[in-house]
Amino acid sequence: MLGKLFLLFTIVPAVELYLLIKIGSLIGPFTTLMIIIITGAAGASLAKFEGRKSIYKIQKSLESGKLPGNEMVSGIMIFIGGVLLLTPGFLTDIIGLTFLIPGTRNLWKIVLIDIFNKKIKNQTAYVYTSNTTSQENVSINSDENVVDAEYEEIRK
């Protein structure tokens, strides 16, 4: 996990810097800077709009007695999309926009749900606690409407 985070925080900024330099040399530094500022402002506005819509849907689900799972996932994705749009760069802007636009966000949700379902079926979901001497092994059984989970504490 630490290796993946290290790659994320080194590779992504390096790619973003490369793209900024390359695109800046093609269209000019002022235009590049203006694109970054405009996408940040537009992204913040879109994230605010979509976030409010998501909160409204969560409230409606709760009022009708339903669990707002799908709406919660959308809310988290909207938040991540907003953060990505506020991060300077072209790659993060593109990914952030796809998290904010409802149609592409739904495609991302399908991919994420598929990943979660595979982890559940393979029983590879683990819960790590702040206690460094133990790890809980989570066993999850799933059908369409019910998730039954058990865990055991593993002492080192």
Image: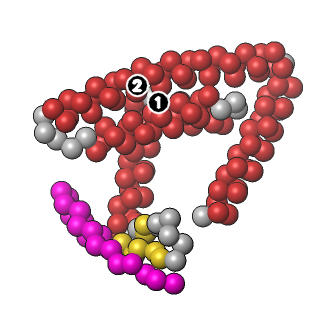
Q: Quadrant of residue 136?
A: bottom left
The residue labelled by disc 2 is: 50
Q: How is the image coloured?
A: secondary structure
Q: Is residue 41 above or below residue 71?
A: above
Provide the secondary structure element on which disc 1 rests: helix
Q: Nearer the viewer, residue 62 or 34?
A: 62
Which is more N-terminal, label 2 or label 1?
Answer: 2
Q: Residue 71, position in %: x, y?
A: 31, 37
Q: Is residue 99 visible?
A: no
Q: Residue 37, position in %: x, y?
A: 68, 18
| Residue 15 shown left or right of residue 122 in the figure | right
Mark drawn on residue 100: 1
Q: Residue 139, position in %: x, y?
A: 32, 74
| Residue 82 shown left or right of residue 119 in the figure | right
Which residue is farthest left?
A: 64
User: Which residue appears at 32% of the width and 29% of the height?
Assistant: 55
What span is in magenta?
139-156
User: Which residue appears at 64% of the width and 63% of the height?
Assistant: 2
